[in-house]
Image (cartoon, rainbow, N blue to C red):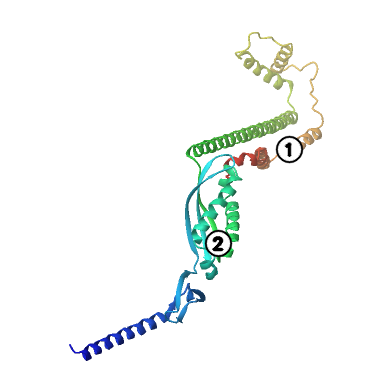
């Protein structure tokens, strides 16, 4: 091949290489930054600027991208860490940290490995916090632990351009023996609470039963008293009416003697009568009957003084029986009142729950 032809090929190759270099330089000079990210640009090895989302142009072979930083909030879970409480119990704690980069330049040049630094700082701070608490406080004081841990991490990572927004304890696992003891303690507290509630229920039931029996006895006694009064008033009015009828009929001794004789067989037929005594008035009654049937007038007229008619009439008028419906309404009102008093007494007699008894049921 002639030297001229070889020279032409070399020139062509040089032109092609130059064209490719220009194309590559143009491609590298155009940089597109997506939303939520920032780029750290260095010029000749020195920090030059921070590119925000959008289209940017760089100087080829002079400007370079040092780091691509995600500006969104990040979630980093840390593996379980053994921590000793103040009462010498080892617990394993899982921690989750939420952080966000606020200053890309500081996050790039102030700390070499920010995630490793945050993890170690979280572990040491967590051990200091848990070491000042006992087991019960560590289990129930998660909010306190989260607040203290977040304050320490946020203060330390602020100069790194990182903001720790939240710190959460995902799990606090005590040893199996401690868990078994806690379950037994909780079961004992629940059994004690159940026994107290049962005793309170039995007590209130007994009080209500006693109050009910008391009010029932009172009502029965009042009913019997009312019944006795009504019965006595009825018998009193009947007796007065009988005597009034006898007085108005002007019964003579013959009729009275006859009625007296009719009553004697009833007395004799009684099963409890072992000895029958004949009263002295029987002979006088027989004499009256004999004289009545023989037509002979008695030597002396027998008179019965019932008093004036006006006095008996007034007595009968003053003897007034209460209305049945009114008496039933009064009895029903007394029964309702007694029932209300019994329920109120039983309700007030119940002892309210003591707050000390609830401590075993609440985690705090």
Residue furthest to the bottom: 4
Residue name at image x 62 percent, y 17 percent: 266
Q: Do the CB atoms of the residues marked 1 and 2 lie less than 8 Å apart?
A: no
Front residue of 307 and 317:
317
Residue 45 in the figure: left or right of residue 327: left
Residue designated by label 2: 164
Query: Which label was assigned to residue 320?
Result: 1
Relative side of 359 to 55, left or right: right
Q: Is residue 321 above or below residue 164?
A: above
Q: Nearer the viewer, residue 231 or 111?
A: 111
Does 108 appear above or below 122? below
Callout 2: helix, strand or loop? Answer: strand
Q: Quadrant of residue 337?
A: top right
Q: Position of residue 198 (x, y in %)?
A: 57, 35
Report crowding for label 1: few under 14, some 14 to 19, many 20 or more residues within 10 A (C-alpha).
Answer: few
Image location (x, y in percent) of residue 178: 51, 38
């Amino acid at each position: 091949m002639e030297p001229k032809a070889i020279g032409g090929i070399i020139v062509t190759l040089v032109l092609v290489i130059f064209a490719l270099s220009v194309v590559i330089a143009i491609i590298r000079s155009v940089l597109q930054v997506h939303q939520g990210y920032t780029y750290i640009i260095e010029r000749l090895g020195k920090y030059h600027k921070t590119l925000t989302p959008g289209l940017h142009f760089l100087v080829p072979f002079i400007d370079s991208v040092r780091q691509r930083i995600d500006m969104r909030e990040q979630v980093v879970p840390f593996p379980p860490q053994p921590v000793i409480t103040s009462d010498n119990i080892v617990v394993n704690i899982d921690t989750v940290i939420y952080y966000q980069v606020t200053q890309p330049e500081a996050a790039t040049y102030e700390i070499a490995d920010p995630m490793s630094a945050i993890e170690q700082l979280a572990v040491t701070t967590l051990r200091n916090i848990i070491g000042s608490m006992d087991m019960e406080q560590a289990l129930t004081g998660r909010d306190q632990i989260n607040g203290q841990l977040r304050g320490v991490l946020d203060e330390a990572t602020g100069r790194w351009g990182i903001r720790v927004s939240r710190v959460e304890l995902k799990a606090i696992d005590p040893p199996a023996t401690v868990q078994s003891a806690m379950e037994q303690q909780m079961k004992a507290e629940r059994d004690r609470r159940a026994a107290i509630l049962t005793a309170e229920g039995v007590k209130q039931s007994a009080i209500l039963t006693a109050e009910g029996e008391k009010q029932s006895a009172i009502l029965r006694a009042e009913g019997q008293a009312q019944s006795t009064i009504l019965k006595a008033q009825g018998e009193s009015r009947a007796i007065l009416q009988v005597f009034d009828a006898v007085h108005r009929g002007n019964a003579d001794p013959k009729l009275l003697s006859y009625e007296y004789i009719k009553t004697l067989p009833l007395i004799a037929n009684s099963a409890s009568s072992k000895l029958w005594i004949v009263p002295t008035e029987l002979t006088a009654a027989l004499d009256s009957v004999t004289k009545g049937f023989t037509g002979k007038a008695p030597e002396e007229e027998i008179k019965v003084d019932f008093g004036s008619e006006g006095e008996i009439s007034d007595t009968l008028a003053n003897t007034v029986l209460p209305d049945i419906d009114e008496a039933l309404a009064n009895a029903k009102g007394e029964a309702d009142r007694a029932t209300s008093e019994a329920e109120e007494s039983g309700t007030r007699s119940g002892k309210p729950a003591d707050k000390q008894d609830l401590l075993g049921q609440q985690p705090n």
